[in-house]
Amino acid sequence: MGRTIKMAESPMEGHPDKLADLIADALLDEFIKKDPYSRVSLEILLISGMTFVAGHVSTEGYVDIPGVVRKTIKEVGYNRPEYGFDADASAVITSIEEQSPDIVLGISSEGAGDTATVVGYACLDTPNYMPLPISLAHTVSQKVSELRKSGRAPFLRPDGKTLITVVYEDNKPLFIKDLIVFCQHDPETSLEKLRDYIHEEVIRKVIPQHLIQKETRILINPSGRFVLGGPLADAGQTGRKIVSDAYGDVAYSGGSAFSGKDPTKTDRTASYMARLMAKHVVASGLAQRCMVQMAYAFGMNEVIAFDIETYGTEKVDKEKIKARLLELFPTNPKKMIDFLDLRKPIYKQTACYGHFGKENLPWEKLTKLEELSELKKEV
């Protein structure tokens, strides 16, 4: 096995693509608050001075779409004209239609709301069973945003991104090879001040020191000043950060985006169920690493294909683990929604800093650990 390098990036909430995801899930939450059975599929496009909201929605409730959009943009911190994207001045253009009757027919028969392949993953790298690179990248980006929004670092602006690479040996993380942070800032702030601040107040405080070795390269705004950012500098769109939404490059990507989709969309709900299954396998001690893969076809009410990969770390025969997972966890689209209690406004919190690893979310709760652990006694 030897040494390998694993990597991950984490865009901050002011990154144009992440802001688009955040708006999409903020709108989804509002629709679900008004009508838990709302069927929502939204796409957001951001460019300087404009927000486009397009998609298909069927609901019994009313949502003030421009109001939610502007409120979300303001919460992120785009609230000044000099940022090039101002919540109060941004035009909001909507094009919303009813959900297709053909899709309604497929869902009403408890079928999948989309054709999708999905992936769930868990490992022993971190206490929340997430890969170390993506966990560290999210931690750094979240800390930068926290300092900015708290007022402790008023010279920071909303856009930014963290990239981390980690050296593994025999599939165990050794140390950080590269830690690169990009932070948008006001024009008066020197690069020296910015770099010193991020190093002292972020990196030294959130990165475990044993992961920083002499080979580690730490770079902060290596390309120089970063004043223009957000939708002024680059258009943003939903669904363009699917690898950072999931597990970094450690596991496969199912290929589908999550944000802006209600739970009847199997590419979202089944991804959450796959994560729950994989986490249970690792937390129960049945394997050190686990990837769960599932496939769904639109309108069909059962999983088309189901498999797991435990990378040779399993303590019990893989076929037995697969069979027990299918006994304990539903794979029918409607039953997954009910099992995870997904008809609630919980989605806005998933849009930034990852959909997985946040312990308060239902697909992170180890509710079947005891039942799955029984497998070890049967060996």
Image (cartoon, helix red, strand yellow):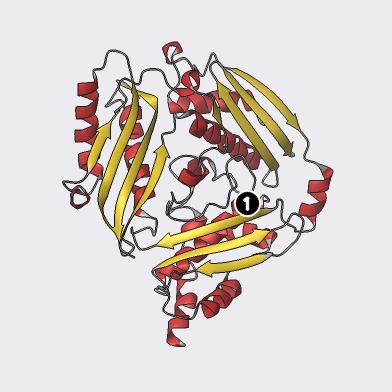
Q: Extreme left residue here?
A: 214
Where does residue 362 sit, x and y in percent of width and height?
51, 56
Where does residue 63 sit, x and y in percent of width and height?
66, 31
Count up the numbered dots: 1
Can you tell which quarter of the image residue 101 is in?
Answer: top right
- Using the image, determine if residue 102 lies above or below residue 83: below
Q: Quadrant of the N terminus?
A: bottom left
Of 62 and 370, nearer the camera is 370
Of 364 and 116, nearer the camera is 116
Can you tell which quarter of the image residue 185 is in?
Answer: top left
**Residue identified by numbered label 1:** 267
Can you tell which quarter of the image residue 174 is in?
Answer: bottom left
Q: Extreme front residue here?
A: 2
Q: Is residue 72 left or right of residue 99?
A: left
Q: Is residue 171 left or right of residue 46?
A: left
Residue drawn 68% across the image and 40% down it: 40
As shown in the figure, which amino acid type bears the numbered disc 1?
Asp
Other-residue count near label 1 (Cα within 10 Å), few / some / many at <14 / 14–19 / ≥20: many
